[in-house]
Structures are given as structure tokens and as C-alpha cells.
Amino acid sequence: MLLQSLASFCLLAATAFAVPAQEKRVHHHADLSDHAHNDAHDFQYDHEAFLGKEEAKTFDKLTPEESKDKLGKIVDRIDIDKDGFINHSELHYWIKHRQRRYIEENVNKHWKDYDMNQDDKIAWGEYKNTTYGFYLDEEFDDIEDKATYKSMLTRDERRFKVADRDGDGIATREEFTAFLHPEEFDYMRDLVVQETIEDIDKNGDSKISLSEYIGDMYTPEEGENEPEWVQTEKKHFTDFRDADKDGYMDFNEVAHWILPGEVDHADNEAKHLIHETDTDKDGLLSLSELLDKLDFIKISTITDFGAMEVDEHDEL
């Protein structure tokens, strides 16, 4: 299960063009939703991988007839060979396509905000002044959580410098993509691990204990019984995450956890979606099978690469 609480410095929301909170901390190639993935219960997970997070919200508001019509259009888009069925390869390609589109659109959206002189590059000064300018003028003195803002600025500058491969203080579009989405770039790997440890490590010992690991995902309400998934995560920590059994996850163990090699998450999600919706078990999804599982499609969670309408003019 992926962590559910991304580090969110809410105070920065007051700035005009602050990078969204979910982009401030990255664990790995993120799930296609901000819901945890539980095969037994978590339908919202698959819903959002198939449709996209924002598209899924829209889908939930449609009438049955509208849902059927919209789902038919989506199925037609995915069905590349037009044989009336969706196979694993087509679904895998669709999910990967949505991932790429999300990243491209996300970068394009922020590019307009930060490229102040419109030279098709973003200097560190442009990013810093756009995001923190007002507060920099005041030296953060009028901000209640001054330390948090200074920490955010330091963290952003470090990430920007790592993303800036040629070290000229100016980000090309590719370098700025690495800044916003470091999980997509091998050369940002160590930074992704470092940021994750910093976010979860509460006592500053540069490693993650079991209590810190669970505490990042779950805060019990008074009188609440601990959910079963928490017990499962505790076992995962002990049996798998803490490889050397010293009671902590160190840098290498965190790296193995959040960046586990060449894992194709889109492939895994495609397999899971087919497993859950392929009623006749022929390895193919028909529109009728998806309609039969419409409640599943409408309330499941595979990924957070949504925020996109299905555009009939969008080339796969």
C-alpha cells in the first residue's frame, strides 16, 4: 500500500502560484489515485486509473444512460484494433498514455506561471520570486510559521539544483519536468528517497521507525479500533521493508520500498482491472462486461493521473 498523506504545507496555498502540495513530495511512480489500493475493497482505486481522477468525479454525477454513452466512447478510444474488445496491451497503453498526458499538461500549466520573461526557460530566480516573492521581501517575518516557509524554500532550491543537470541555474522544459515530477527521472532518484525520509522521519535520525512509518499513514481517532490494513502494514514493515531487521528503514531500504526497480505500475493496474471486470475470464473486456461492473468502475481507485477529459481529438 502506498502512503496516503503527502507532505502538504498548506500555508503556501496563499501564494499566487505555489506548486501544488502533492508535487512537493514524491514517493515513487505514484498510484493512479490518492486512495489506498486494497484488492478486496478498494474499488475507487481502479475507477480513477481507468477514467482519471477528475473524470471519475464527473462520471459519478451522470445518469445511467449518460454513463453508458460516456463509457462507450472511452472503450472505443481504448480499443485500438476496433475488434469490440479491450485487451491487456490496449489497456496498458491507455493508462501509460494518460500518465504521459497528465505530466505534460501539468508542466504546461505551471510553465505559463513561472516563465515570466517568456524565453521558454525558467530560471531559479523566476520560480523563487513567483512562488515566494512577497514573503521574501518581508524575510518571512510576518508569517506565523516562518520556519516552515524557510524549509520549503530550501527544499525547492535543492530540488531545482538537482533537476538542473547543466548547473546553469536555468531549467529547460525537461529539467523543469524533473523538478515537478522527480519520480520520472533516474538522476532524481536519490533526492526522491531523501525527501521521503525527511517527511516521515520525525526525530531527525535519518531513518524511519515502525511508529514513524505507520504514523505517516494513520492517526487513530479516540476510541477507534485499529483497522486491519494497519496491522497488515506493520507486518509488511517487519517482514519486508526492514530488510536487515534492525527496527528501522535506512536510505537503501526506503529506496527499495518507494523505487522498487523497473516496476511497470501501468501494467500492474491493467492486469488488476481486467482481473476484476473480465466476467468470462477470456482476457478481454467488452463494453457489456464493463457496464455490468459499472458500479465497480465508478467507485474504484487505481491512479491519480486524471484531471483530463476524454478528448475525441486527442491522439493516442
Image (spheres, rainbow, N blue to C red):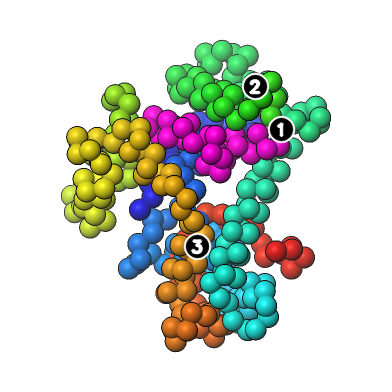
Q: Report whether 124 appears left or right of 120.
A: left
The earlier-in-sequence mark between 2 and 3 is: 2
The residue pinned by badge 2 equals 167
Could you say which disc has been placed on residue 71 in the image? Answer: none
Above or below, comparing residue 109 to residue 152 in the picture? below
Quote the CA–CA distance across marks 2 and 1: 11 Å
Amino acid type at image mark 3: Asp
Q: Secondary structure at mark 2?
A: loop
Q: Which span of residues is magenta-colored? A: 173-199
Above or below, comparing residue 91 to residue 292 in the picture? above
The residue pinned by badge 1 equals 172
Quote the CA–CA distance across marks 2 and 3: 35 Å
Residue 180, percent from left and from top: 59, 38
Residue 51, percent from left and from top: 57, 65
Image depth: mark 2 or mark 1 in front: 2
Could you say which disc has been placed on residue 267 in the image? Answer: 3
